Image (cartoon, grey):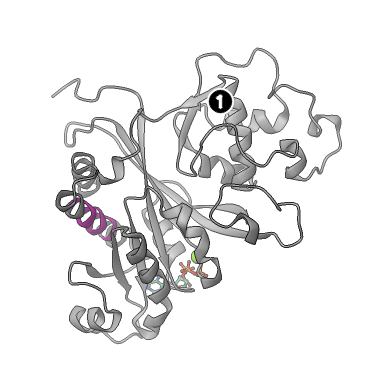
Amino acid sequence: MAGDDGLLDDGLGAVRPYALVGGRVTPSQELDRASLVKTGPSPPSTPLQSHYAKAFDLCRAGAVSVAEIAARLGQPLQIVKIWLADLIVDDYLTNAMPDNCADAATDPRILGEVLAGLQKL
Amino acid sequence: MLGYRNSDLTLSLKIVVSGGFGVGKTTLVGAVSEITPLRTEETLTEAGIGTDNLTGIAQKSATTVAMDYGRITLRSGHEVQLAHDVQLQLFGTPGQERFWFMWDDLAKGAVGAVVLADTRRLADCFAAIEFFENRRLPFLVALNQFPDARRYTEHKVRAALGVSSSVPVVSCDARDRASSRDVLTALVSHALHRAQLVPSA
Ligand SMILES: Nc1nc2c(ncn2[C@@H]2O[C@H](COP(=O)(O)OP(=O)(O)OP(=O)(O)O)[C@@H](O)[C@H]2O)c(=O)[nH]1
Ligand SMILES: [Mg+2]
């Protein structure tokens, strides 16, 4: 889906971000602004549409948050969530977080580690 | 203890930095972040309040809200052992009160919140305090010490804010990295204490 003919690639130039999500209003994957993604096991074999390619390139260096990608692309969070979800469905990107980390923010062991880490900064 | 870190996965933990207009939120995020702070933009519509949803994004009623973004990566090393690398994600909220409704999604799953306050206009942070109290999110009040502001005792400030004695009230200089880092340390320490009292269900 990320390789479909792109409006941006047609030389149209300015395209409202809304057009680049094909009118969809919700991403196909649950992504929070703080979710971390990284490149997946199978890199794209054909060139991605430019907005997907830019998002993908930002993930090459390792785990990066949805919010950071959106900020660096200068696009609204909601739009970027949809693009990233598409890239995850295609296996170009993958979740960089451990499974079952939903309760990390209230896990005393993890908070203890974070506290020790911050004190050593 | 080599091999304690068991994967190349990274934990993500959110911290919210809020408070009234011009109180130093952007300054604090920039002072502690390991990257030049960024701005994230979200498109909000009244129809989309509290939902992760683009309905109405193309309408004229849509508003763009900017938030500060910064991060701190904690890596396992010989001094600190972590099961996973951790990325602390710092989100600085917009100062204007009319955007409070978007914090619901922002607060979900967060470690806690820093409520920055200026003693010259303490009332500016009331809305934030009320919000985090209602959400039962651990928070602390950080008094950003502007040079021309009178110094009050922690006791006086606590009384004026009407916060429980368990809520930490600390002073800081948001421009200073170590001072801002200490605010985060106090917040995580508070969240840890809360987590030990209330085992997560
Ligand atoms: N003296 C002093 N000045 C500060 C401190 N923190 C911030 N400032 C200054 O106060 C002004 C406002 O700081 P910001 O960080 O932009 O405040 P903000 O809360 O992000 O403001 P809004 O996003 O507009 O609500 C800037 O000019 C800062 O340089 C501080 O600790 N001491
Ligand atoms: Mg600001």
- Corner quadrant of residue B180: bottom left
Query: Secondary structure under badge 1?
Result: helix
Report x, y in % for residue B45: 65, 59
Q: Which residue is mark 1?
A: A88
Residue bounds of the magenta highlight: B183-192
- A90 vs B170, nearest the viewer: A90
Q: Is residue A85 magenta?
A: no
* Residue drawn 52% across the image and 44% down it: A67
Three-letter amino acid code at the position of disc 1: Ile
* Placement of B71 over or under A30, stated as above or below: below
Q: Is residue B162 above or below residue B193?
A: below
Chain containing mark 1? A
Q: Residue at x 35, y 38 (%)?
A: A102
Residue B44 visible (yes or no): no
Q: Is residue A86 above or below residue B124?
A: above
- Relative to the observer, which residue lies in front, B48 or B178? B48
